[in-house]
Amino acid sequence: MIEPRPLLITGAGGFVGRQVVRQALALGHQVVAMDSVTAGIPEGARIVAGDLGDQEARGEALGDGVCAVIHLATVPGGAAEADPAASRRINLDASYDLLLEASAFGNRLRFIFASSIAVFGDPMPAHVDDATPLSPKMIYGGHKAMIEQAVALFTNRAMIDGLSLRLPGILARPQAPSGMKSAFISNLFHALKAGEAFVCPVSPLATIWAQSLDTCARNVLHGLMYDPAYLPPAYALTLPALRFTMGDLVEEIARQCGSRAELVSFVPEPALEAAFGAQPPLFTPAAEQAGFVADRDLGALVASALTALA
Amino acid sequence: MIEPRPLLITGAGGFVGRQVVRQALALGHQVVAMDSVTAGIPEGARIVAGDLGDQEARGEALGDGVCAVIHLATVPGGAAEADPAASRRINLDASYDLLLEASAFGNRLRFIFASSIAVFGDPMPAHVDDATPLSPKMIYGGHKAMIEQAVALFTNRAMIDGLSLRLPGILARPQAPSGMKSAFISNLFHALKAGEAFVCPVSPLATIWAQSLDTCARNVLHGLMYDPAYLPPAYALTLPALRFTMGDLVEEIARQCGSRAELVSFVPEPALEAAFGAQPPLFTPAAEQAGFVADRDLGALVASALTALA
């Protein structure tokens, strides 16, 4: 009997990675979980401890072949701004190396690359749809946009069967420093759940796009099953997301937690308002036709995000 | 008196580079001309001999500041296919380094990056316009697409004032091996001018986009003067080009050279026909509004290309 080949998940110890590993194991996948910090990786995966920039660790993770790659490992947005060279090393160079090494098996691996809505830059255009040109402003978004091009290149060359998925904000992250500039949105959940006062750095009318962690992980895994015949020409999809105001989010979290919305005061910081509080109407027909989903409504998103916190 | 800062032109010894240097000098620019092969660089430029991948040579070329950069240096398409690692080193890594180093002067240099219609891949979509998504297939086009994203990133960050110009086929190249897969189109000029038989590797109905060398160089230099307020969101423009069939091109060259179109036989090679003989209708309103131009008509393009050969 031939052993089925495992699924490689990079960044498996991260916030999104752990949930993707959990769901992949539940679906019956054999999982190779790679990360430099492996503490939180769910049991049942074969763990490879190592930095994405370490060629030997990548070699160990890919072994003599995997059935697919989900590439989540990244230097996140805030950390990339603080250290552009680290972002270049991991988000650009090592990601390109991983694409090359995954190509070397010669069997056109499905390769899911976790890109980001940061590829659209800020301020965003008046609305975003499947034809919106990329114009990144954060180092993080710039390197994601560059690797999206590499994914398209390698897919057009039949070296991989690639797909870039642009993730919106994912809720709710743990309270530990994540390196994400958008962490304040998650911190709001923690504060209201604990009944603590919270100073929100964007206005109540700030509009954001988001997905719950559970929905995000389901979308990433749906990428493995999605028929490549329907892939868009650039092999990149912006994931559907709910769009709502911070004011409505505060009300909904307070309602579900039995907490008080009055705990939150709003002291907008212009840079954060521009980068994370002015997300325009979003249209994602290509991803929706392909079966990718947003959370059903704000109530469902908040309930799911609160469950993940628990 | 403060010395005016020079204009840096990389790839200055190449086919396009030499003409850009010539025109820049004629416009009164002080020019720093960088290339690894410097033999053909027009007199009057300060020459820096060195490979783009050589950090010291880049440092010498940038000196203590330049007024603008025209970045033409590249591993061309055919050579990049044959040696993807060399393309990565020059077309990706060294080009990114040059962007970083040019940013370090802090005065938002105009930075013109010579990209290519190869970013659209092959086969191309039914038509190409300013909204066509990038989907490169050749290594060369892939790395150009990646650096287009870097140009947008650095421009959005106010590190440079960048513009990517996507060049179509440029006519007519010298007969020496250029590393360009599309060299056969230029070789047709040489054969008909010399009255020699020529086997054309695409069909007479093959459609191509092209610019004469002179028009191309004028467009590149127009990039320096173009008002950044009108730049498109992605800071990239596809240059206007004439679109014509190989059959019409053969007739026009023969007419202008007093040669015979019957010297040309057509033996299409499927890969070349797909990559260079199926260029669809092209719409470039953004570039045209910005004052970039195509050659007036096929007669003018052929006359200009033949002059360049003389």
Image: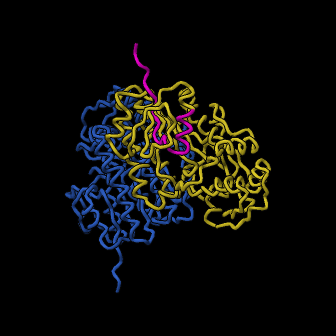
Chain colours: A blue, B yellow
Q: Residue at x 70, y 62 (%)?
A: B198
On the image, the x and y values in percent for residue A123 come to: 46, 33
Residue B190 placement, left or right of B134 = right
Left or right: B220 in relation to B263: left
Nearest the viewer among A99 and A124 is A99
Does the magenta portion include B4? Answer: yes
The residue sitting at the bottom extreme is A1
**Residue at (55% x, 38% y) in the render:** A127
Q: Nearer the viewer, residue A249 or B85?
A: B85
Q: Is residue A94 left or right of residue A234?
A: left
Does B150 appear in magenta? no
Q: Going 60% across and 42% down the picture, which residue do you hit?
A: B238
Q: Nearer the viewer, residue A140 or B136?
A: B136
The count of marks equals 0
Whether B62 is drawn above or below B39: the answer is above
Residue ID at (65%, 32%):
B289
Magenta range: B1-22
Q: Is residue A228 left or right of residue A17?
A: right
Q: Is residue A112 visible?
A: yes
In the rendered image, residue B102, in percent from the top left (x then y), is placed at: 39, 34
Residue A290 percent coordinates (x, y)? 53, 59
Q: Is residue A306 above or below residue B80?
A: above
Residue A295 appears in the rendering = no
